[in-house]
Image (tube, grey):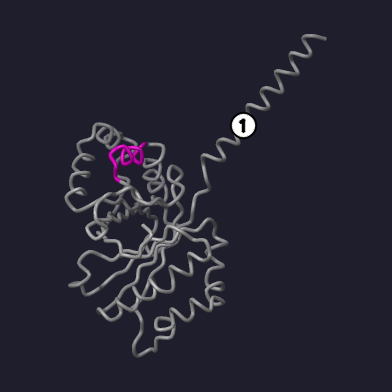
Amino acid sequence: MFPQMNKTVFLRFVFLTCFFSLATFAIAAPPRQYIELRVYHATDSVQLRTINDFLRSAFLPALHRLGIKKIGVFTAIGNDTAVDKRVYVLIPYPSLKELEALPARLDKDQQFQKEGSVYLNAVYTQPAYKRYESILLKAFELMPEVAAPQLSGSKSERVYELRSYEGYTEKIFKNKVQMFNAGGEIDIFKRLGFNAIFYGEVLYGSRMPNLMYITSFDNKASRDEHWKAFSSDSAWKKLSSLPEYQHNVSKSEISFLTPTDFSDL
């Protein structure tokens, strides 16, 4: 009788341990967000102003009312002299269902329709933008949610660095994603204080296969110092020299951004 009771107690202990372990894991590991990155292309300062006014007065307030937070709005550094003036909008969603439902919800939002009327009702002879592209990403396992940066400098001086890494093939691309997660590249960025906004795998976009991420810095000098530390870091040197992680990026692209005064990030 006594041994049987011990066995019962033991089994209950194992069950409770597994239960609380799974519960703790569920709390510690939130679902990976879906991230929409919109890139508006403008031809002149008039379109640029129309886009920013719409985002500031109508779009972000409407998304906030729907419970969507941590929306980033950035302009490309050098927009004033560029032929292609760009505005980047980063929108995190908890699920694809939320993303799919957004247009219909905005159509029913009378305040949004009123505040965004100049943009929404632009005529074909004076369009609000030249074109915009939409890139859908899914956050990486080791950073499942968009994060606000922990920066102390003036917002106007901040530099956000958007990087895009394309792969030769789907298999080789997955190798680069693994390098960020299991390989430890994200851990190195975190340890060195790169203040990442997100890391994500592109699910749909004009360039596939592809991953993108944004890191942030107080200013340009801080950005250069961080990358200098990264390139000389012993853990990075070891990781980047491993045979299994060689030749896993076919093309990389860097865009330097600055946050608007109304950006959540």
Left/right placement of residue 81 relative to residue 264 reads left
Q: Residues within 10 Å of mark 1 (few under 14, many from 20)?
A: few
- Residue plotted at (39% across, 58% down): 208
- Residue plotted at (40% across, 84% down): 118
Residue 122 x, y percent position in the rendering? 40, 86
Residue 80 x, y percent position in the rendering? 20, 72
Furthest residue toward top = 2
Report helix, strand or loop for mark 1: helix
Three-letter residue code for mark 1: Phe
- Residue plotted at (21% across, 44% down): 227
Residue 25 x, y percent position in the rendering? 55, 36
Segment colored magenta: 184-194
Residue 161 x, y percent position in the rendering? 27, 55
Q: Is 192 a magenta residue?
A: yes
| Residue hosting label 1 | 20
Left/right placement of residue 230 relative to residue 201 reads left
84 in relation to 243, above or below: below
The count of marks equals 1
